[in-house]
Image (spheres, rainbow, N blue to C red):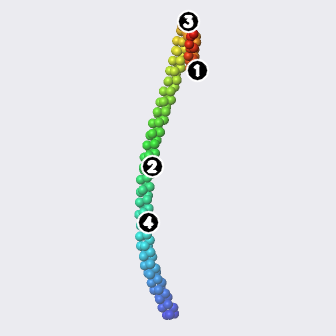
Amino acid sequence: MDFAILAAILALFMSMGAMWLTGGVLKKLDEQNQIFLQTHITSLRKDVKGMEAGLHKTGASIADLQNVREGMQTRLTEHTTQIEKLKTEIARLNKEIFVLDRSIPDRYRNRTTVAPTQPVAAKPPSSS
């Protein structure tokens, strides 16, 4: 029985030593992993900051484009309104011209008209 107790104590010390050695190895591995991760995390943080700056610029550009679009929409609406007013004015003037044209007596009207697409023919020389 003394041998069994001695073997058990020896096994206990061996397992404690193995755990102590394993703990040391794990500590070294953890330090190496921390260095590795810090190196990669630092570069990732730089990339993330660059992306955030790019997103900020993109957001500002989008806001500028929306302002331009709203300005163009406003101008389009104004132009449409102006075009409608001009059409109304042209129709009114056309009616007034028609009324004025009808007010000219027939005796003062030139009865011979030449279509604007036809050239005016020169008068043949008179033979006198």
The crowding category of the residue bearing disc 4, from other C-alpha atoms within 10 Å (few below 14, some 14 to 19, many at least 20), is: few
Residue at 42 percent of width and 76 percent of height: 28
Q: Are the residues at dot 1 and dot 3 in contact (C-beta closer than 8 Å)?
A: no
**Which residue is outermost to the front?**
128
Where does label 4 land, which residue? 40
The crowding category of the residue bearing disc 3, from other C-alpha atoms within 10 Å (few below 14, some 14 to 19, many at least 20), is: few
Q: Is residue 99 left or right of residue 38?
A: right
N-term-proximal mark, 4 vs 2:
4
Where does label 3 land, which residue? 107
Residue 58 tag number? 2
Name the amino acid, label 3.
Arg
Percent x, y of residue 24: 43, 79
Q: Quadrant of residue 102?
A: top right
Q: Nearer the viewer, mark 4 or mark 2?
A: 2
Q: Nearer the viewer, mark 4 or mark 1?
A: 1
Is any part of residue 16 visible from this angle? Answer: no
